[in-house]
Amino acid sequence: MSDAANSSQPKVKGAGITAWDVARIAGVSQSTVSRAFANSQLVSRETRDRIFSAAEQLGYQVNIMARGLSTQKSGLIAVVTGSTRNPFYWDVLRLVDERLQAEDMHVMLMTVKEGESTDSAIRKVHQYRVDGLLVLSAELSSKAIDECREFGLPVVLFNRYVESGNVSAVACDNVVAGRDIAQFLYNTNHRRFAFISGLEDSSTNKDRLQGYCDQLQRLGCPPPLVEGGDFTYEGGRQAVKRLMLQAERPEAIFCANDIMAIGALDGIKVDLGMRVPEDVSIIGFDDISMASWSGIELTTMRQQTTRMVESAVEILTQRIDAPDLKPEFRLEPGKLMIRRTVRLDRQA
Amino acid sequence: MSDAANSSQPKVKGAGITAWDVARIAGVSQSTVSRAFANSQLVSRETRDRIFSAAEQLGYQVNIMARGLSTQKSGLIAVVTGSTRNPFYWDVLRLVDERLQAEDMHVMLMTVKEGESTDSAIRKVHQYRVDGLLVLSAELSSKAIDECREFGLPVVLFNRYVESGNVSAVACDNVVAGRDIAQFLYNTNHRRFAFISGLEDSSTNKDRLQGYCDQLQRLGCPPPLVEGGDFTYEGGRQAVKRLMLQAERPEAIFCANDIMAIGALDGIKVDLGMRVPEDVSIIGFDDISMASWSGIELTTMRQQTTRMVESAVEILTQRIDAPDLKPEFRLEPGKLMIRRTVRLDRQA
DNA sequence: GCGGCAAAGGCAAACGAATGCACGACGAAT
DNA sequence: ATTCGTCGTGCATTCGTTTGCCTTTGCCGC
């Protein structure tokens, strides 16, 4: 209905309405409209009201591209992720978007595929003049990151950092978490240990392993056996088989993430016909939602994602306002979620 | 290093470089630079080369906001999702981004929280002059969607549609899928049926149920018992208990998504101490990655997400180029993944 | 030798908002 | 009554591209 064939004035409400249109109706200048929408103090109460009601009537919405051209801000944060299927990142992403929306900013997604060049991603980041960069995965090389940083772009790494130390990051305190896990397993009378690792040289992985090893050594235990599980379900499932076929079977296996831990669980039960935690204890990392499902009930180190995301967004927004702030490196403690995959009895 | 205190010419490479700077160095006008970057035929080979090498040297990148102001295109697609933790959407989202990047477009995320107003989301969509809208979840009211459509904005619904029929959509063929599931269960000698539903009035849910019921009726079976499971793990787990406590226990339960099916599985095994598929068959929908894990091995209807996403992006991009195209409604068939949660023997 | 045409590229006007500067009006201080 | 502030506005420029419309140049055919 109302498809009356013509085109004089009453275009579709809100179609190409500009601040000028609003200005005309409200009987003010375009500048004043602009100021009203920027919440400037320099507009009187009544004028503002008049402007807003005109805007409403016309369905006017600020054109962010025009504004951005003027202010050199896009309101966009590029969130870089790899092509992982780990649902952990979905949880994080949703939290990030939620926090950013509260700051009137928005997520522009930038998934970079496994082996591919990140050049195009970097280019896009520049072309869109994004206000900041949040890196969730390891796919972006530190060279690329440095490039952005030198460009004056605030960058925050999530759950990862680079050695140089001159880029902000927030992460779970992986070293301490690894240490706590070692201690916890030791306290529950485990004495032979193993570790299923993700990507060997991700800082996440290295730190978790290091804390684990350190503490084991301090406790006088032999170092853990280590197998690679590639951060995937199938990887964990295969790795655990290799581990359990060794002469000296481990009594406890720490997996660098939950997905591998769940793979390990299945490997033990299905492939090896053994039981958890009677034959071996398994502990994961992340606390994804599946970890608490009753078929699984994985004991794991929870990452406090809400706090981590809040920190990350805070660091980012601070640096958008004041680009010269020093890089900040924030660690949030993990939280051990004791469920049923670690044997708790105190008798050996 | 090279933090030499000054500011004459050699700013940070690529900082505020414009097409004018490139033009000056290449000895051409800014228009020509613009045309070169737009791949216009009107620039000679050599000029183009000169421009590109100047651009490279300066680290020039087109400013998309300025371009957008001129062309009225942002290159942004708003992807609307709800606050679901279902990892299915993570898989979809990654595929969407991948396809869109191939078309030189980008995802702007718009999660809208459960009960909250979508007004602010709609406003953002207008402010950023996004080129299109891809709606993944049910959170956006059809009123809001119509509003966008009238605005001339291409909209595609994913796995959902509205009655009016005047907005494009791509979905799994839920009715046929429901029918196939009924037939499959009938063929495997099940005779008493149940359904665990998600959100009662989502089109997804209704269609799956309808196909299921239709076919059962056609086969002369009584209609299924129905319980609500809210599309969540816990919901599925509770629902299955209610179902299995009925006098006439169902022999087969179709769950409207995998997450609920997995919840149901656990409910049966853990809460009720029964076995699947010996005591009851369970079938899910989606084929999320966990469904194939060996601790689960859920029989389920796979949604062919890659094809669906390709269709959605195609419909969207077509309509961005030609806004007056009729809405298109495309259905992709599901694919039954037979695993171990449905009893297959042909004896009753 | 001249008209005509095409190719290559320049000019300048959009696009829509932000903002420094100037100006008028009004109140208070002198 | 005069001067000085302050508040509320308007004017005009700016942000970096795109693009319609002109020019210039060279070349061809007659």
Image: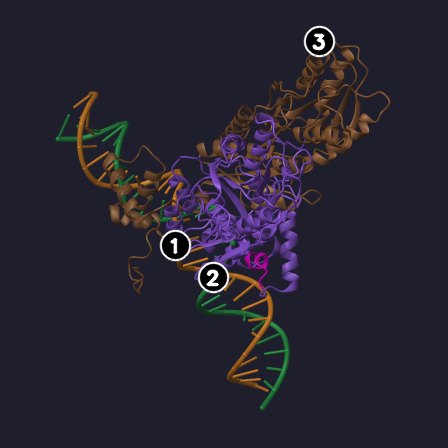
Chain colours: A brown, B purple, C orange, D green
Which amino acid, by three-letter code, is at mark 1?
A: Ser
Q: Label 1: state its secondary structure.
A: loop
Which amino acid, by three-letter code, is at mark 2?
A: Ala
Image coordinates of residue A83 in percent, x first then y, are: 65, 41
Q: Earlier in the sequence, mark 1 or mark 2?
A: 1
- Please, is residue B268 above or below residue B318 in the view? above
Q: Nearer the viewer, mark 1 or mark 2?
A: 1
- In this view of the protein, which residue sits in the foreground, C4 or B320? B320
* Image disc number at residue B96: none
- Provide the residue span drawn in magenta: B33-40
- Please, is residue B208 above or below residue B282 in the view? below
Q: CA distance from mark 3 to mark 1?
A: 65 Å
Quadrant of residue B2 within the rendered picture: top right
User: Chain for mark 3?
Assistant: A
Decide if residue B85 is in sight here.
Answer: yes
Q: Which residue is mark 3?
A: A346
Q: Are marks 1 and 2 on the same chain?
A: yes
